[in-house]
Amino acid sequence: MVLPKIQSIENLKDSEIAIKILDLKKELLNLKLKQATRQNLKSHLFKHKKHQLAQLLTLETQRKNIN
């Protein structure tokens, strides 16, 4: 599975970015809980979710610095 490019999220509004950031943080927490309870999980999802979160946080910071 290929990591998503930042160009795919650049056209989102600020409110949509904030919602996606919260969703990704919740998903990461759920993945950590699954890992802690030794449930079935796909470990590569950690990398993908963290990558997406970093992209969104970077985009959010860039927009705040411009305004």
Image (tube, rainbow, N blue to C red):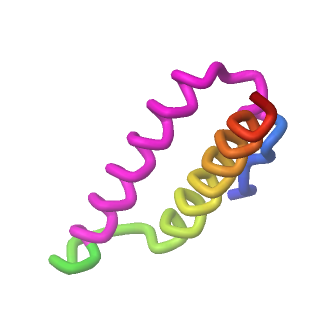
In percent of width and height, residue 53 lies at 57, 53
| Residue at point 65%, 40% (across, down) | 60
Residue 36: within the magenta? no
- Give the farthest residue toward the left: 37
Q: Which quadrant: the C terminus?
A: top right
Q: Is residue 41 above or below residue 30?
A: below
In this rendering, the count of numbered labels is: 0
Where is 56 relative to 64, above or below? below
Find the magenta span and give its range.
8-34
Residue at 62% in and 52% down = 52
Which residue is located at x 69 percent, y 36 percent? 64
Which residue is more in the foreground, 24 or 36?
A: 24
From the viewer's perspective, tell me whether residue 33 is left or right of residue 48. Answer: left
Please name the predominant secondary structure of the magenta segment in the image. helix
Whole-percent x, y for residue 14 in the image: 60, 24
Q: Look at the image and say whether residue 12 sits in the magenta stretch.
A: yes
Foreground pick, 36 / 7:
7
Q: Quadrant of the N terminus?
A: bottom right
Judge whether 44 appears above or below 53 on screen. below
| Side (left or right) of 50 relative to 8 | left
Q: Is residue 9 left or right of residue 33?
A: right
Name the image quarter holding residue 34.
bottom left
Q: Hey, which quadrant is residue 59 in on the image?
A: top right
**Residue in the picture at 52% in, 22% down:** 15
Location of residue 48 in the rendering, given as x and y in whole percent from the top left corner: 59, 60
